[in-house]
Amino acid sequence: MGTRGLSRWVIAIPMALLAIATIYPLLFTLNVSQKTRREYVLDRFGLSNTFGLDNFVDAWQTSGLGTYALNSTIVTLGSVALLLVFGSMAGFAFSQLHFRGSKAAFLLILGALLVPFQVVMVPFFRVLGQIGLLDTYPGLVLAYTAQFLPFTVFLMTSYYSRIPGEIIEAARIDGASTFGIYLRLMLPLGRPALVSVGILNALFCWNDVLISLLTMQSADHRTLMVGVTALRGQYSDNIPLFAGGVVMAALPVLVVYLFFQKQITDGVTAGSTKG
């Protein structure tokens, strides 16, 4: 075996182990979701002898997962919309418009990426309570927008920096205003980055537990991930039903990863190379 073949094995073996460690919990949860309560108690790790949707139906109907999924959809769509609007505007401004304090403002936004939510959790909770946005959709949408906006601005600025400034100058010579350049030129050119960043932010919002748990305090306003987490306590004696809820909550995320792998990769690497 040559040096090249050996180096491939050195990379392939750890990657294969990582893939197994990632896929096995998914398959185990799916297998448990197919079992009855009795079957799970008798043999937790064995393959299920039956196949059906009973646990999925029971989890959906008896635990309110339908309401939780609707709540997650509302706040995710609202948050992604605001993030794309403000993130694309800020990215255009920082990358193509030169104004006093732009570098300092961009560095301040980059600094916000280093601040974990746990640091601002207490003042965040107090501010939302003072302005009456606790346990409301707008409150959670604004919370997600504030939390993920620095990441969005960074990626959009990196992407827009690759667009030659001559295009902007030509548009100005043709009489386009700044907002016209943004609307008619930058948005179409930034569509690949907007799609990638939109998918990433949708995954962030959909998978979040901490911010949603802190903001949405009533059971009717829980998001899907918080609702599934609560299932563990409500149905501690019925693990197959809990597993069915987990599978349903994870399914949208898995579908997005399977069908939008390229867009997700492009979003993570946006601006890393010069075009």
Image (cartoon, grey):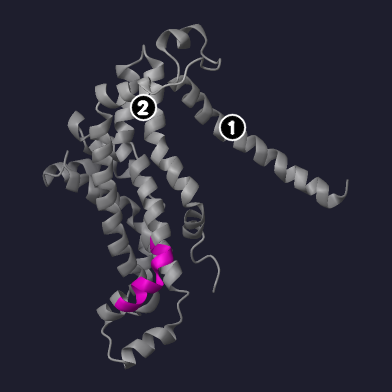
Q: Residue furthest right?
A: 1
Do we see residue 214 in this rendering? Answer: yes
Assign the magenta stretch its main secondary structure: helix
Do we see residue 102 in this rendering? Answer: no
**Percent coordinates x, y for residue 124 in the rendering:** 23, 44
Residue for point 20% across, 35% down: 221
Residue for point 53% across, 65% down: 272
- Say few, some or many: other residues with alpha carbon within 10 Å of mark 2 (under 14 / 14 to 19 / 20 or more): many
Q: Looking at the image, is 64 positioned above or below residue 71?
A: above
Q: Is residue 160 left or right of residue 183?
A: right
The stretch in magenta equals 184-194
Judge by depth and name the residue closer to the eye, 191 or 230.
Answer: 191
Judge by depth and name the residue closer to the eye, 124 or 66.
Answer: 66
Q: Looking at the image, is 189 positioned above or below residue 210?
A: below
Residue for point 56% across, 33% down: 23
Q: Secondary structure at mark 2?
A: helix
**Percent coordinates x, y for residue 205 in the rendering:** 33, 45
Q: Secondary structure at mark 1?
A: helix
Which residue is label 2 attached to? 245
Magenta highlight on residue 185: yes
Which residue is label 1 attached to? 21
Q: Looking at the image, is 233 positioned above or below residue 188?
A: above
